[in-house]
Image: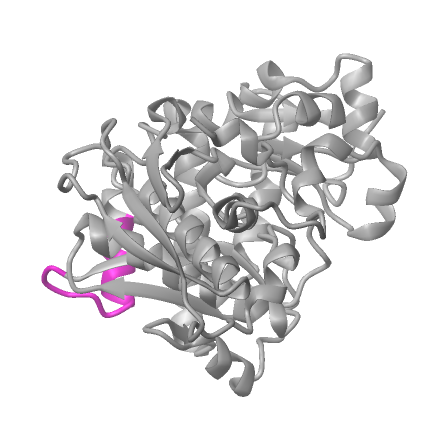
Amino acid sequence: MPLSRRSIILGAGGVGLALVGGGAAWRVMRTPTTAIAPWTIDPRRPADPRLDALRYAILAPNPHNRQPWLIELVGSDRVLLRCDLDKRLPETDPFDRQIIMGFGTFIELARIAAAERGYAIDITPFPTGDPQPRLNQNPVAQLIFRKDAGVARDPLFSAITHRHTNRALYQPAPPTPGQLQVVARENVVTSADPALLAQIRPLAVRAMTIETVTHRTFMESVNLMRIGAAEMNANPDGLPIGGPAVEALQAVGMLNQKLIADPSTDAFKMGLKQVQDSCGSIPAIIWITTPGNSRAEQLEAGRRYVRAQLRATTLGLAMHPLSQALQEYPEMTDDFTRVHRLLGASGSERVQMLARIGTAPPALPAPRWPLEKHLV
């Protein structure tokens, strides 16, 4: 059964192999109902406001969909967040910077959801000190929930369950200047400048190509691919691979991790071309720069990113991280330097996040473990 290049995307650091074409194809494939169930929030609120907020927090964007959050409920008002050290990405994220940003997105969604119920959260990042050079078993953050009649409800709350990372081809037309202004708040920068994009597009494609053809970094993605609805339901994390063509090929043994990993196969070559096309379809970009690269700044960058994505969601815009050039392994050194120069970061300044933003077909919800899976 032939696969057209318009049917699938195969890539590293992204969705893996995903259906392009939107809702119609999604309706005819086997739906991973268990894997996406956490996106449907039960209107009955848990008695414990922490559990209420945390069921929204687990929908946060995070690298490779690892969902590394370990949650300990302490007493009646406290939460300790730790990292599941087995969920780190040592090849593409050797210093756990991206994983920490995923904790920043988690904490911000928890804060937004808590405010909806009239609770504020006092956040203490790394209460026992910054873990260096990698994360350890000490808490990433302590959250204390307190009832606060004056806490303001956040207008972004309603976008949480509609926010999805979208890895499809984007339409060439950029968002309007007004839309980019809405997204570009809280130290988030946006641009649709043609001269800048003409330099960013080949850089993004080159960085994705490096990650894909470098065996050890690509295998970090391949080993996390969940092919077909059954695998997604059994392990609702990592990189989902779905669609009617995928299900058919898997059923006859023509699609598996081994074939995807082999650069000599048509699946690998076709997928590399598709993911290059996808990462090159950049109508506009957003980026986040911090003065330094402390653990607290990494958490803050995650908070800013998810708020920018929620604002984009309210406008009907899609976003997708272009994180490859920001990764800190040797093969990426040259592009790491280039992207910082292009985005105006100098000295100790650090570009924490780069993403494309624009219009694309609707994205599917990413698989999620249920909240109880994260509770210690």
**Residue 337 highlighted magenta (yes or no):** yes
Q: Where is residue 316 in the image (x, y as percent from the top left)?
A: 66, 70
Q: What stretch is highlighted in magenta?
A: 335-348
Can residue 283 be seen here? The reply is no
Q: Which of 323 and 187 is in front in this view?
A: 187
Instruction: Judge left or right: residue 216 versus residue 358.
Output: left
Queried whether the magenta region covers residue 16, the answer comes back as no
Q: Is residue 335 visible?
A: yes
Q: Which quadrant would residue 366 be assigned to in this image?
A: top right
Q: Which residue is drawn at 17% across and 62% down?
A: 349
Of residues 166 and 194, the one drawn nearer to the viewer in this rendering: 166
Relative horizontal placement of residue 169, taking residue 296 as reference (left or right): right
The correct choice, above or below, for 53 with respect to 235 in the image is below
Residue 229: x and y, percent? 75, 27
In the picture, residue 127 is in which quadrant?
A: top left
Q: Where is residue 362 in the image (x, y as percent from the top left)?
A: 72, 57
